[in-house]
Amino acid sequence: MATLKTLTSSSTISREQFKQMMAPVANATDWRDALIQFAFAYGPAVGTVGNTKRLVEEYTQVSIIESIGTTEIYGSDGLPRFSPQTDTEKHEMLLARQEAFTLQSTAPLLAHLLHKVAEVHGVPSQADLTEFFSQGPLTSHELASSIARCFIRFWTGDPEGATFTIAPKVETLARELVVSLDAGVYRLQRQEKPGQYPGLASLLSTLRERGLDESWYRNILTICGNPAGGWNLRNELAHGFVGECGSPGAAVLFQCVMYLWTLGPKQKEAETDSEVPDSSR
C-alpha cells in the first residue's frame, strides 16, 4: 500500500515586519483595548469567506488531482470522517482545507499577539478580567470569571490548561446566544434528542440562519468542529485525541470566544424576531 508523505514549509519575516504586526496590541491604550485588538485587528483566523472562495477557485482551475481524484478524510481514530459525494460536499472540503492552511500562519500570529498583551500591558488580575468580561451582553459573572481564569492560565505559562478550559466556552457562548434569540428553537433541539445537548454545529447553524457573519461562522466551525476538514480542535480535545496543546491552538479558541462574547440579540422596532448584530463592537 502506498503512503503519503506530509510536506511542511516555513517562512521568515524581518524584525521590523514582526514589530508592525504586533502594533495593534503594543500600541493599545490598555490591556482591555489590547484584547479587542487581539481578537479583531486581523479578522477571523481562517480568513474572510470571500478570500477563501477565491483561493479555492484559483486552485481548482490549475489542479489536475481535484478533477480526477477522490478524497476521504480520516479522523484521529483512523476511521473515515468525511467522504464527499456531492459537488457541494467537495466544495466544502476544499474550503475547509484552504482555511486550515491559512490557520498555519494566522494561529502563531494570534498567539504572539495574545502573549504581547501581557508583555506590554501586564497580566490583569482575575477580578479585573472578570469585571471586563461581565460586560458581555450575555455573560454572567460566573462565566466571566471562568473565562478570566482561562486567560490567566495562558499568560502564566499554561497554554495546555488554557486550551482545554477555554474550548467549552465557545459552545457555552453559542448556546447562550441561541437561547437569547429564540429559546423555543433550543428547547425543540433538546426534545429531539432527550438527554443530549444540541451540538456546537447545530448551534452555529441556528446562529447562521439568524444572521451570524459568514466569515466568523466558518472561523468557529473550521477551528472547532468541521467534519469536512479544518482543525476540528474542539472535537479532538473533547474526545481525547490531543496529546499536547500549544499557544497557537489556544489563541484561535480565545479569538472565537472573544467574538461570541461581543454578540447579543439585536431588537428591531415593530418586530418580534431577533437577530445577531451585523458586526461586533
Image (tube, grey):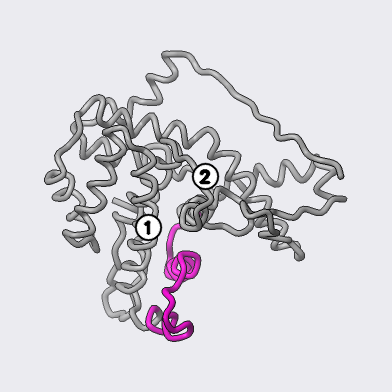
Locate residue 172, reporting x and y percent.
34, 63
Q: Is residue 38 left or right of residue 43?
A: left
Residue matched to label 1 = 168
In this rendered view, identify the residue nearer to me: 199 or 239. 239
Q: In this view, does 28 lie above or below 130?
A: above
**Is there CB contact under 8 Å for labels 1 and 2?**
no
Locate residue 102, reporting x and y percent.
56, 39
Numbered tag placed on residue 46 in the rendering? 2
Q: In this view, does 144 lie above or below 180?
A: above
Q: How many marks?
A: 2
Point out the tag, 1 or 2, that comes first from the N-terminus.
2
Amino acid beneath label 2: Val
**Helix, strand or loop status at disc 1:** helix
- The quadrant where residue 182 appears: bottom left
Magenta highlight range: 186-215
In this rendered view, identify the residue nearer to me: 98 or 164. 164
Amino acid beneath label 1: Pro
Locate residue 245, reporting x and y percent.
45, 40
Q: Does the magenta stretch include residue 196?
A: yes
Locate residue 96, reporting x and y percent.
61, 51
Q: Which residue is drawn at 33% across and 67% down?
A: 177
**Helix, strand or loop status at disc 2:** loop
* Type of secondary structure dominating the magenta stretch: helix
Other-residue count near label 1 (Cα within 10 Å), few / some / many at <14 / 14–19 / ≥20: some
In this rendered view, identify the residue nearer to me: 147 or 242. 242
